[in-house]
Structure formats: structure tokens, C-alpha cells
């Protein structure tokens, strides 16, 4: 079932990454993103495979596994896919939904358009990556 | 005084930033002379700055234990620049010298207003995250 436009914008507004967006920016974002309703057990990315989509977990939950080991859990508002998208390599982890979820998917091109148009998203991404980088370097 | 371009080029975080944007970044740096024995940053303090050493030597220590020696072209504090977190090490000058510094509140607006600075930073950070996370496995 497709979400109505307003519902999609509301979903986006609840995602911290987009919380600084203006109404107009949210509308542009909503036009770029595809939303999917998924059951539990769906693989959003698979470690080692190629894939360039950026995925926002708008509602629901997922687990992140690397070499079969659970390394993180994601909840509503979290995002994934940014490393492969930005660094051009394969997926660094497998992400699988653990409950019925709503995800918003941006292709790498759409993501670049969004990043160019909405600077606050860039700043948030830089922060999120810095945190991840710091965890990885500990 | 803004930081020289060739000094900024030596910073891996700025790898993919083009010279025009690098020059803009450079304008946000100020020069800070230091003298031997001076504590440049202190572990556990909230100093929010990124520094590049132009001349002189300094030592990095964590909980009083020696970790590394820094010299011209070396830099520290790039993560604090972005997340404003607490210092994880103490850096003490061994000789007189000069460094260039930028605070996170100078850096942030540059990233927020400027996709052509933000995007290359993101690419470099993503690459490093990938390398570090894969090293652990």
C-alpha cells in the first residue's frame, strides 16, 4: 500500500537525520524516496554484495550482522547503507528486519540530489559518521 | 592568518576536498605559536579544535603514558572537530613551534552551508570507517 504524500512527509520528519528539514525540503525528499512495508526477516543489505541504496528505517527494527555475528540493532529513525554509497565498495554488513517495518529507500543518485539540496542532512551525516568512526577506532 | 594550502593538503580528512574549498577551509584556521613544555590539549577536557603542526615537536600521551611524537604536517583533534567530544589524549609541546587551529563552531557552518566541502569529507570518512570496521574481523 502506498502511503499518502502527507503520511510520507510525516514519516520523514520523525527521522532525526531529516529533523532540520523545512517543509519544502521534506516534500522534495518525499518525492525522491520510495517507501516499502516489509515483514520481519527481510534482508535489506547483504554483506559483501554490491548495493548503493540508502535506506531509512522509518518504523520497525532490524539487526546488523557481520560474519554471522550480530553487531548492532537498528530502530525507528536509524539509517543504513551510507558506507557503500559514499565509498563505492560492497556492503559492510547484512541488515535484516526483525519486525514488520516501513523503510524509505533512496537511490545513490537521489541521495546525492538530496545532499546537494539540503545541507543540514550533510552536517548530520558527518556527525553520524564521526561517531561511527570513533567507535570503530576504539 | 589562514593555514597554508600545502599544509592542509597533508591532512587525510581533507583528501578529496578540492583546492578552492580547501582555501576556504584554510581561512577559518588561525595560527597559534607554542612554546616548549606547553600543554596544547588536555585529556578529558572539552577542547573542541582541530590542529595541524607547522613547525616544532610535540608528544601525545594517554593517562600519562607516551603514545606518539608529532612533528610538522601532523595533526590532531579531527574527531573532536565534528562531534565536540572530550579529549582522549594530552598533547604537550617538546619544542617551540607553530600550529594552525580551527574550532568546531567554525567548522560546522562550513559543512552545513557547503555541499562541496561536506561530500568529500563524507567520502573520506566512509572509506576510513570501512577500513577500520573490516580490520576488526
Image: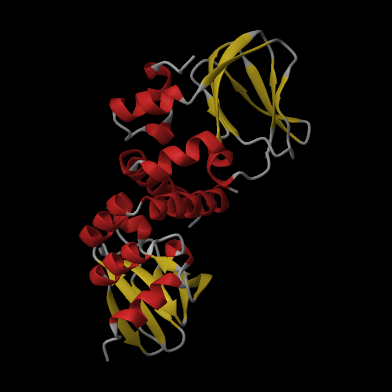
Q: In the figure, B32 relative to A52: above or below?
A: above
Q: Nearer the viewer, residue B88 or A19?
A: A19
Question: In this orientation, which residue lies closer to the viewer: B16 or A46?
Answer: B16
Which residue is located at x 50 percent, y 71 percent? A69
Q: How many marks?
A: 0
Q: Residue at x 73, y 17 (%)?
A: B38
- Is residue A108 in sight in this rendering? yes
Q: Position of residue A135 (x, y in %)?
A: 57, 53
Q: Residue at x 26, y 54 (%)?
A: A112
In the image, is residue B73 above or below residue B16?
Answer: above
Residue A43 in view of the camera: no
* Residue A14 location (% of width, % of height): 47, 73
**Residue B92 x %, y %:** 70, 21
Relative side of A115 to A17, left or right: left
Q: How is the image coloured?
A: secondary structure
Q: Is residue B117 shown left or right of residue A137?
A: left
Instruction: Name which residue lies at 42% across and 35% down.
Output: B13
* B126 shown above or below A59: above
Q: Nearer the viewer, residue B70 or B96?
A: B96
| Residue farthest toward the top in the current orientation of the protein | B96
Specify the farthest residue to the front.
A23
Outermost residue to the right: B64
On screen, residue A73 above or below A1: above
Where residue A79 appears, as percent x and y from the top left, is: 42, 67
The residue closer to the viewer here, A47 or A9, is A9
Q: Quadrant of residue A81?
A: bottom left
Residue located farthest toward the left when viewing the structure as drawn: A109
Amino acid at each position: 500500500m502506498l502511503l499518502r504524500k502527507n503520511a510520507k512527509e510525516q514519516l520523514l520528519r520523525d527521522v532525526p537525520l531529516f529533523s532540520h528539514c523545512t517543509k519544502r525540503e521534506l516534500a522534495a525528499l518525499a518525492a525522491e524516496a520510495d517507501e516499502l512495508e516489509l515483514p520481519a526477516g527481510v534482508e535489506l543489505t547483504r554483506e559483501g554484495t554490491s548495493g548503493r541504496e540508502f535506506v531509512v528505517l522509518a518504523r520497525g527494527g532490524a539487526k546488523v550482522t557481520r560474519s554471522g555475528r550480530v553487531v548492532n540493532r537498528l530502530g525507528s529513525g536509524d539509517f543504513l547503507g551510507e558506507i557503500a554509497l559514499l565509498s563505492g565498495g560492497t556492503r559492510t554488513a547484512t541488515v535484516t528486519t526483525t519486525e514488520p517495518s516501513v523503510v524509505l529507500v533512496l537511490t545513490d543518485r537521489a541521495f546525492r540530489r538530496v545532499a546537494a539540496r539540503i545541507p543540514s542532512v550533510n552536517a548530520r551525516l558527518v556527525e553520524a559518521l564521526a561517531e561511527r568512526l570513533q567507535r570503530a577506532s576504539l | 592568518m589562514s593555514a597554508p594550502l600545502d599544509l592542509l593538503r597533508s591532512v587525510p580528512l581533507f583528501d578529496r576536498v578540492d583546492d578552492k574549498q580547501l582555501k576556504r577551509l584554510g581561512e577559518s584556521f588561525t595560527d597559534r605559536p607554542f612554546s616548549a613544555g606547553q600543554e596544547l590539549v588536555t585529556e578529558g577536557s572539552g577542547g573542541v579544535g582541530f590542529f595541524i603542526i607547522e613547525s616544532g615537536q610535540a608528544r601525545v600521551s594517554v593517562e600519562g603514558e607516551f603514545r606518539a611524537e608529532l612533528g610538522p604536517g601532523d595533526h590532531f583533534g579531527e574527531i573532536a572537530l565534528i562531534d565536540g567530544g572530550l579529549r582522549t589524549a594530552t598533547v604537550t609541546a617538546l619544542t617551540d613551534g607553530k600550529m594552525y587551529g580551527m574550532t568546531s563552531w567554525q567548522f560546522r557552518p562550513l559543512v552545513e552551508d557547503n555541499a562541496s566541502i561536506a561530500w568529500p569529507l563524507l567520502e573520506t570518512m566512509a572509506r576510513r570507517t570501512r577500513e577500520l570496521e573490516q580490520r576488526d574481523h
